[in-house]
Image: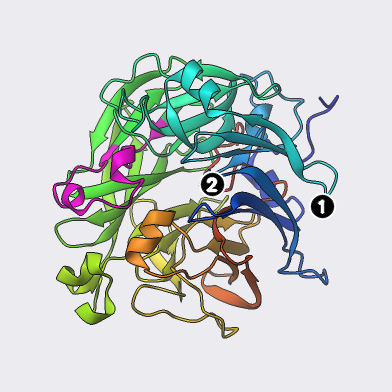
Amino acid sequence: MNLRPDPTFYPSPKLAMEGPPETLAYTLMLSPDFSQPDGLAVVNVDPNSPDFGKIVHTVIMPNKGDEFHHFGWNACSSALSPLTGHAFLERRYLIIPGMRSSRIYIIDVKGGPTAAKIHKIIEPAEVFAKTGYSRPHTIHCGPEGIYVSTLGGGGKDGTDGPPGIFIMDCQTFDVIGRYEIDRGAQDKHYDFWWNLPRDYMVSSEWALPPQFENGIVPEDLLSNKYGHRMHFWDLRARKNIQTIDLGANHQMALEIRPAHDPVRQYGFCGVVVDTTNLEGSIWTWWRDADGKFQAKKTAIIPPQPANADDLPDLLKGFSAVPPLVTDIDLSLDDKYLYVACWGTGEMHQYDVSDPMKPVLAGKVELGGIVKKTKHPCGKVFGYGPQMVEISRDGKRVYWTNSLYSTWDDQFYPGERGGAMVKADVGANGGLTLDTNFFVEFPKGYRTHQIRLEGGDCSTDSFCYPSV
C-alpha cells in the first residue's frame, strides 16, 4: 500500500486526459481450440520506441480451456471517491477471468513490461462455493472492492439460478460473495457501470451459457430469447430499482457506457441486432427530473446486402450482413462514441455532444464477413473490429478482432488469427488507420480485450468521482 494515492489515479476526466500518453497495452490471447493455455501479451505502443507495435512480453497460464474474454485492474480512479476507503491502493494487478473455466488469474504488472507474472490463481470451486455464480465476465474496480459480473448461475450448464455480480477483496483477492440483495426482474447478465456520486448502477443482458458457449442458437435468436433489457440499481443498497425493456426484437443489449462526467446522468447501450430487419442500434438512456430512467434508440446501423454464396451458413437465408454491434466505447470528454460493427467490418465514430442525436463523424473499414477489407499495410485483418480501447487523451483508438471462439467460427469459418490495430483521431473528428501499427499474435491465438498502461478499467466508461 502507498502512503500517497497512486499517481495514475485521476479525480476528474479532465485531469486524466492531461496525463502522460500510454506506452504499453495489455492484450488477452486465447486459444480457441484449447490446445494451448491462454495468455497475456504486453504490446509496445510508444511510437518513439524501436519496439513500437511489437509484443515485448507474454505471460502464459498453466491451465488450458480458460477462454479469456474481459479483464480489468484491481484499483482505479474510483479509489479516490470518499466513499471507498481505498485511496492508497496501487494500480498494480490485472484481474483476468476465464469465461469458460470460471478460474480467475491475478497478474502482477509492477516492475516493468517484462516483469508481469502470475500473483495468484482463484480456482473455480471457490467462486462456485462463495457466490453460486459461474462464467465470470467483466471486471470493474469500484466501491468496496473488485466487482465481477458473471454470465452463469450454478450447476453444470450454469442455469441453476440467475447470474449476477460478486465482489472480491481488492487487496487479498479473496472472493467475498454476491453483490445483489434484491435483483428484481434481472435474470440474465452482461455488462455494468455506475455513477459513483449519484449512487446508481446500470447493467445489461446477453444470454445464459447454453445460448452462447457452443455458438449462437439461431432458434433462440429468431424467437427473441436473448437479453433485451437494461437494469438500474441503487448502488449502495444493492437493489434493482427499475428495469427497461428495449423490445424483444432488440436482441443482445450488451455494452453499457455512462458519461464520464458524473454531472451528466446519461449513457449509451449497444444492441447487437434487431431481428425484424438485422439493424444494429445505439440507445441513449438518461435520468429524468423525477429520478426515473428512460431509454431511446438514437442511432441505427443498417445491414449490407450480400450474395448468399459469400455468406456463412448462419446468414445465407438473409442475403445480407448485419453490422453486429459488439462493442462501444466513449471518449473521456464524452464527445465521441466508437461503435464496433464486427459483422460488416467497420469502426464508426459518432459525435455525441448531443447524446440524443449521435452524428457519424468518421468511419474505418477493416475486415468484415463479406468485404474482407485489408489493412493499409497490406495485411489481412481476420474477422472484424471488436473490442475497443481509447487513449485517455482521446487521440488514439485501439481494437482487436475476436468476439468469442464459437461465434467466431460460425460467422467467420476457418482460422483467421489474432490482430490488434490503431487508428488516429483527427483534430475535428475522423479516423485514420496507422499504417505502421499492425500487431500479429502467435499462431493459434486470437485476441480480445485491451487494457492500456495506467488507464482506468478502460476509458470505456469509468465514471470519475469528481467533476
Q: Nearer the viewer, residue 164 or 99?
A: 99
Q: What percent of the width, then of the height, locates residue 273?
A: 26, 56
Which mark identifies residue 58? none
Judge whether 263 appears above or below 247 on screen. above
- Asked which quadrant contains residue 351, the reply is bottom left
Count of numbered badges drawn on the protein:
2
Kind of residue sitting beneath label 1? Thr
Write the residue at 24% across / 79% down. Answer: 306
- Please say whether residue 211 is visible from this viewpoint: yes
User: In the rendered structure, which segment of residues is drawn in magenta?
Assistant: 202-229
Q: Nearer the viewer, residue 85 or 354?
A: 85
Secondary structure of the residue carrying numbered label 2: loop
Q: Please say whether residue 314 is one of the residues in the magenta stretch.
A: no
Write the residue at 59% across / 46% down. Answer: 458
Q: Check disc 1 and report the residue beneath it.
A: 114
Judge whether 55 appears above or below 247 on screen. below
Q: What percent of the width, then of the height, locates residue 71?
A: 57, 42
Residue sitting at the far front: 35
Q: CA distance from mark 1 to mark 2?
A: 21 Å
- Please say whether residue 358 is visible from this viewpoint: no
Q: Please say whether residue 211 is one of the residues in the magenta stretch.
A: yes
Residue 137 appears left or right of 93: left
Q: Check disc 2 and report the residue beneath it.
A: 68
Judge whether 405 appears above or below 306 on screen. above
Q: Nearer the viewer, residue 445 or 430?
A: 445
Kind of residue sitting beneath label 2? Phe
